[in-house]
Image (tube, rainbow, N blue to C red):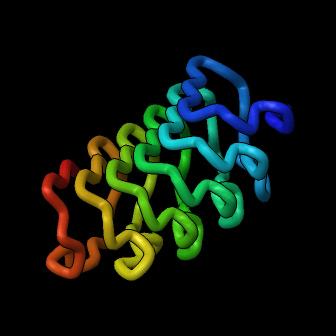
Amino acid sequence: FFEKLTNLESLEIENGQLNSLPTRIFSSLFKLAKLSMKRVNIEHVDERAFESLTNLRDLSLEENYIQKIEKNTFHALENLQNLSLAYNQIENLDFLNVDSLANLKNLNLANNKIKKMLLFHQINLARTTY
C-alpha cells in the first residue's frame, strides 16, 4: 500500500481495523519521521515491522490492544526520541532495549497492565509516564 509514498515524512492513522503490523509493512517509507497509529485495534506487532524506519523520531501506538512487544521490535529505530504505547495492555517491558533506544527522550506507558519493570536508570529519558 505504501510503495509509492517514498517521500512521506509523517503518517497518522486513526480509528481503523488493522489488527497487526506485519513484517516490513513500512518498508518503502525511508523518510518517515513521525508515525501515529491511534485506535486502529492493533493486537500484534511483528518484531520486523519497523525495520526500515531508521529516520523515525516519533512513534505512537496509543489506544490499541497490544499485549506484548518482542525484544527486537524497536532495534532499528536508532533515532527514535518519542515513544508512546499508552492505553494498551502491555504487561512487561522486556522490549526496551537500552542499546537501540539511546536517543529516546520521552516514553509514555500510561494505562497499561505493567507487572514487570526494568531498571529505567539505564535509559537516559527526559520524561517517562507510566
Q: In this view, does 96 lie above or below 90?
A: below
Q: Residue 65 location, x and y as percent?
A: 55, 41
Name the residue furthest top.
15
Q: Is residue 60 visible?
A: yes
Q: Residue 105 location, x and y as percent?
A: 24, 57
> Which is nearer the eye, 120 or 43?
120
Q: In this view, does 129 lie to the left or right of 62?
A: left
Q: Is residue 70 visible?
A: no
Q: Is residue 56 left or right of residue 21?
A: left
> Which is nearer the eye, 62 or 6?
6
Where, by quadrant of the figure, is residue 2 drawn? top right
Q: Residue 107 location, x and y as percent?
A: 28, 53
Where, by quadrant of the figure, is residue 92 drawn? bottom left
Q: Residue 83 location, x and y as percent?
A: 37, 50
Q: In this view, does 68 lie above or below 96?
A: above
Quadrant of the frame with the N terminus: top right
Q: Is residue 92 above or below residue 31?
A: below
Q: In this view, does 43 lie to the left or right of 10?
A: right
* Count of picture labels: 0
Where, by quadrant of the figure, is residue 17 drawn? top right
The residue positioned 66% from the left and 66% from the top of the image is 47
The residue positioned 18% from the left and 63% from the top of the image is 125
The residue positioned 45% from the left and 40% from the top of the image is 60
> Which is nearer the eye, 82 or 4?
4
The residue positioned 35% from the left and 78% from the top of the image is 98
